[in-house]
Image: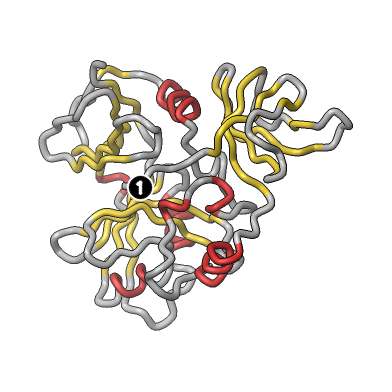
Amino acid sequence: MPLRCAPADTAVVRVTGEDAAAFLQGQCSADLRGVALADALWLNRKGRVLAHTVIAKEADGSFLLLCPHLGAEALIAVVTANVIADDVVATDESALWKKWVVWGDVPSVAGAKVITTQRYGVAAWDVLAPIGVAAPGELAPLAELDAQRVAAGVPAVPADCGANEFPQECGLDAWVSYTKGCYLGQEVMARIQSMGSLRRILRRVSGSVVVGQELKSSEGKVLGTVRSAAGQVGLALVSVDVPEGAILGEVRIGAPAQMAAR
C-alpha cells in the first residue's frame, strides 16, 4: 500500500521538572520504568477513562505527551490535576509541530519524530514534523484509517471507551499495568483483575449499524449500544450475558474488541 497521511489535531505537551518521572508514574496507568515509549490511560478515582496519551521519554529527561482526542489545555488540566508541591511543569508545544497520522508504509521525514501506534489495527505512525515540511505521503481522510480500525476490532478513546467506561470493558487491558504499584484508579483496576466483575464488554458487530444505535432483545430489552461504525461493521458495548454469535434485531454479535500491546 502506498504511504498515505492525514492531518491530525494531536495535542503535544511537554512535561518537565525534577519530579516529572515520579509524578507521571504515579498518575497514569502505564509503567514508565525502563521504557522510552508507552501508551497510557488517565483514569479518575473510580477507574473510568479520562484520556489516552502516548508518553515518549526524551533524551533530556523530559516527557512528550501526545493526545489524539483532547486539546492541549484540556490535556494539561487532566495531567496536572494532582500536582501539589511537585516540581512538574506541563507546556503546550502543539504549535511547534505539523502533526500527521501516516499509514501504509514507514514514513521518512527529515527532522520529524515518528512514533508507531497500534490505535488503528494496521501499521500506522504519529508523525510530528517541523512546520513547513511537505506532507509525508498521499493525502487521505482520517475516516479511511478509522474504518480500518473498526473493521479490525480495535477500540478507540473516547469513541468506545470514555468517562463512563472501565478500560477492561473495552479491550484496553494492554494499556493498564497491574504490577507497577499505586496510581490514580489503581485500586479499581486491581479489583476488576481479581474479581472479573464486568457487566459489559465491547464487541465487534456486523449488519446495519450506526453510532448510538440500541441493540435490543426480541422482548425489547436494551442489551447494548453501538459505539463505532463503518459500513456494515461496528463496535458495540453489550451485556456480558450476550454470547458471541447472538443476533439482536439485524445485528450479529462478534468477538471482543482488543487493543494490541505496544
Image point (50%, 29%), residue name: 150
Would you call the spot at circle 1 few (<14 residues within 10 Å), some (14-19), or many (20 or more)? few
Image point (41%, 62%), residue name: 177
Quarter of the figure with residue 240: top right
* Position of residue 193 measured from the top left corner of the image (x, y, whole percent): 53, 63
> Furthest-bottom residue in view?
85
Q: Which is more toward the observer, 94 or 20?
A: 20
Asked if residue 91 lies left or right of residue 47, the reply is left
* Position of residue 16 measured from the top left corner of the image (x, y, whole percent): 27, 67
Residue type at mark 1: give it. Answer: Ala
Image point (37%, 42%), residue name: 10
Q: Please, what secondary structure does the residue beneath circle 1 have?
A: loop
Say which residue label 1 marks: 261
* Position of residue 73 measured from the top left corner of the image (x, y, whole percent): 45, 54
Quarter of the figure with residue 238: top right
Q: Which is more toward the observer, 171 or 99?
A: 171
- Tell me if residue 155 comes above or below residue 229 in the rendering: below
Q: Which is more toward the observer, 109 or 92?
A: 109
Image point (34%, 49%), residue name: 66
Asked if residue 135 lies left or right of residue 192, the reply is left
* Position of residue 174 measured from the top left corner of the image (x, y, whole percent): 41, 51
- Tell me if residue 255 comes above or below residue 73 in the rendering: above
- Tell me if residue 135 comes above or below residue 25 in the rendering: above
Quarter of the figure with residue 239: top right
Asked if residue 90 lies left or right of residue 115, the reply is right
- Tell me if residue 118 comes above or below residue 179 in the rendering: above
Say which quadrant the N terminus sits in: top left
